[in-house]
């Protein structure tokens, strides 16, 4: 077994997590900020090569694989780890700070892994660390975190079984492009889609993420689902089934976000919606569509984190999260409100923001491939995004009625994190070449055409008009929306109880039958002992066998009793 040496970019984050277990004060803040910056530098020091271990259990493991796609996602993950750490400097939970660094390190490990086994190892590190991020908030997060863990362990099991099947079929663990044409590859694809928030298990995102702390959800929004986008880009570009899975996610997120009252649950459903655009782009599979999925993942991490920083700041300063309890906060939290508006415009693909120069690649790719139904549904989905995230979130939280709350803007580190990501949202929208020059695939794209700008503005104006015309219906009340997770949180419990009762009845019937059969056998042995062959003189070997048989019968009788 030999190894080539190339340090993985995840290493500084893992070492930073170890230091955070003992660091205090300024040292703690320095580690939270410097570890991601060192990781970012290492991302760009990785050459276009593979490094790993050869001959491990008969397989070659690629611990670090450098190429444009890995550096693309590695860059935005490291930036997110830095901004998330900056935003969370006031977080008192040492457990969350440690888990967040491990979580980000796991994500970096996945995007630089070149084989399925290494991918699985970092995949599970992410699952465990993100669960701890949820749990660190305490209270109701315990149950939500446990359900979250079960879902992700299921995804890990599917990935592991599929990887084992792929290794057996091909003799290799290499993680390259594969078609979903075998049972093993379908299992791998299913494992990836669970992390993406695909149906029927999409509800784990709005179930778990809003139960985390004000800073925890910012970190959670960035890594798990976008790591899933990365592995889908790496492994299944052009898989047609992903188009329809992605479209389902687009409209699922819109419908539930419109119905929702809690501001962080609105944004959680919006994560599913936005990842749906990326998954659909991967399914289309052209270079333009794949660039669109990759660039939209980059932009989404930034503007979604900005939206959640804005919401997290409101939660941090007021202790409230429901739209029915908020309103009028722009008076005393102007910077937080402006940041939320910038994020809302970016997620809505408003011209001169990052979302405008990324999301449209996917719909334009659908048009170029003459997938007109897909193009139409993506356009309708874009209008729906403005309706629920572009207007609903900032309107009900910062405007609408005056709630009487007068909190100030959050501490300086939280404001700095929001300003950083607000700047990036506008920079990438105004100067898209900064983003496009590093795209992982070869297609070129010009976002600022008259047709594209006019079409997008028409969609946004239509959505805005519809929102204010339907404002009375969209105004939320303190209600609970039922999602698919009801089946395994309520109906599933009832089903499990019924199965358990049926199993107890079956066991009692089986035990009664076994006792009757054993009683008949013992009765027969008794008769033989008095009048039959057992009454005759036997040699010692035969008697030993009889004794063993009787002991076995005795043990069976005791077991069934």
Image: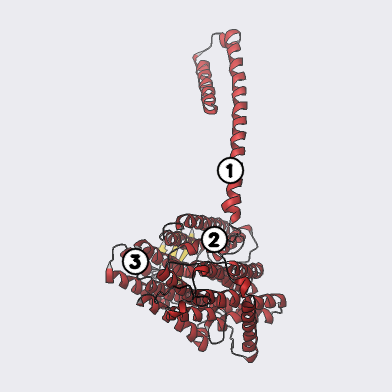
Relative vertical location of residue 261 with respect to residue 79 in this rendering, above or below = above
Number of residues whose C-alpha sits closer than 10 Å to that of mark 3, classed few (under 14), some (14–19) or many (20 or more): some
**Left or right of 85: which side holds 558?**
right
Placement of the C terminus among the 4 image quadrants: top right
Is residue 49 visible in the rendered image? The answer is no
Which quadrant of the view contains residue 29?
bottom left
Task: Say which label, 3 or 1, has the lower sequence index.
Answer: 3
Q: Which residue is mark 1?
A: 497
Q: Nearer the viewer, residue 283 or 530?
A: 283
Residue 303 placement (x, y as % from top left): 50, 77
Q: At x 59% / y 63%, what residue is drawn?
A: 189
Q: Looking at the rendered structure, which numbered label has been put on residue 230?
A: none
Residue 542 placement (x, y as % from top left): 53, 16
Relative vertical location of residue 341 with respect to residue 476 in this rendering, above or below = below
| Badge 2 vs badge 1, beta-carbon distance below 8 Å | no
Q: Which residue is mark 3?
A: 15
The mark lying in front, picked from 2 and 3, is 2
The CA distance from mark 2 to mark 3 is 30 Å
Task: Say which label, 2 or 3, has the lower sequence index.
Answer: 3
Q: Which residue is mark 2?
A: 204
Number of residues whose C-alpha sits closer than 10 Å to that of mark 1, classed few (under 14), some (14–19) or many (20 or more): few
The CA distance from mark 2 to mark 1 is 23 Å
Placement of the N terminus among the 4 image quadrants: bottom left
**Left or right of 80: which side holds 26?**
left
Task: Say which label, 2 or 1, has the lower sequence index.
Answer: 2
The CA distance from mark 3 to mark 1 is 45 Å
Q: Secondary structure at mark 3?
A: helix
Residue 513 placement (x, y as % from top left): 62, 26
Q: Secondary structure at mark 2?
A: helix
């Amino acid at each position: 077994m030999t190894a080539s040496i190339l340090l993985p970019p995840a290493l500084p984050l893992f070492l930073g997590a170890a230091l955070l277990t003992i660091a205090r004060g300024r040292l703690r803040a320095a580690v939270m900020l410097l570890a991601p910056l060192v990781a970012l530098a290492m991302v760009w020091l990785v050459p276009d090569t593979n490094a790993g271990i050869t001959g491990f259990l008969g397989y070659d493991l690629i611990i670090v694989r450098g190429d444009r796609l890995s550096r693309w996602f590695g860059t935005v993950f490291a930036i997110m780890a830095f901004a998330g750490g900056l935003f969370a400097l006031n977080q008192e939970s040492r457990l969350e700070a440690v888990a967040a660094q491990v979580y980000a390190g796991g994500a970096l490990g996945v995007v630089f892994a070149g084989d399925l086994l290494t991918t699985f190892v970092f995949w599970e590190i992410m699952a465990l660390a993100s669960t701890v991020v949820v749990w660190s908030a305490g209270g109701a997060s315990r149950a939500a975190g446990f359900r979250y863990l079960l879902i992700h362990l299921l995804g890990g099991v599917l990935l592991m079984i599929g990887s084992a099947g792929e290794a057996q079929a091909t003799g290799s663990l290499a993680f390259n492009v594969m078609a979903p044409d075998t049972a093993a590859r379908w299992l791998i694809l299913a494992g990836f889609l669970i992390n993406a928030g695909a149906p029927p298990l999409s509800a784990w995102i709005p179930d778990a993420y809003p139960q985390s702390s004000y800073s925890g959800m910012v970190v959670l929004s960035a890594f798990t689902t976008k790591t899933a986008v990365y592995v889908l880009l790496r492994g299944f570009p052009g898989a047609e089934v992903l188009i329809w899975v992605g479209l389902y996610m687009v409209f699922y997120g819109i419908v539930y976000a419109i119905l929702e009252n809690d501001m962080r649950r609105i944004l959680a459903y919006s994560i599913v919606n936005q990842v749906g655009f990326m998954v659909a782009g991967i399914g289309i599979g052209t270079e333009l569509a794949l660039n669109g999925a990759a660039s939209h993942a980059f932009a989404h991490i930034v503007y979604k984190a900005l939206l959640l920083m804005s919401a997290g700041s409101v939660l941090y300063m007021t202790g409230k999260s429901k739209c029915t309890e908020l309103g009028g906060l722009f008076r005393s939290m102007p910077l937080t409100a402006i940041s939320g508006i910038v994020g809302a415009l970016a997620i809505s693909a408003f011209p001169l923001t990052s979302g405008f120069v990324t999301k449209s690649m996917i719909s334009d790719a659908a048009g170029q491939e003459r997938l007109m139904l897909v193009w139409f549904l993506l356009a309708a989905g874009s209008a729906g995004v403005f309706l629920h995230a572009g207007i609903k979130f900032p309107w009900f939280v910062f405007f609408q009625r005056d709630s009487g709350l007068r909190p100030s803007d959050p501490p300086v580190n939280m404001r700095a994190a929001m300003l950083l990501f607000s700047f990036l949202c506008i920079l990438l929208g105004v100067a898209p070449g900064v983003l496009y020059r590093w795209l992982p695939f070869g297609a070129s794209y010009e976002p600022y055409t008259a047709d594209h700008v006019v079409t997008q503005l028409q969609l946004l104006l239509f959505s805005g008009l519809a929102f204010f015309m339907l404002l009375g219906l969209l105004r939320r009340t303190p209600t609970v929306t039922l999602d698919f997770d009801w089946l395994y949180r309520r109906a599933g419990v009832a089903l499990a109880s019924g199965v358990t009762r049926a199993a107890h009845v079956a066991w009692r019937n089986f035990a009664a039958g076994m006792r009757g059969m054993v009683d008949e056998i013992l009765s027969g042995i008794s008769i033989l002992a008095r009048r039959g062959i057992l009454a005759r003189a036997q040699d010692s070997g035969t008697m030993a066998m009889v004794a063993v048989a009787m002991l076995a019968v005795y043990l069976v009788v005791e077991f069934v009793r």
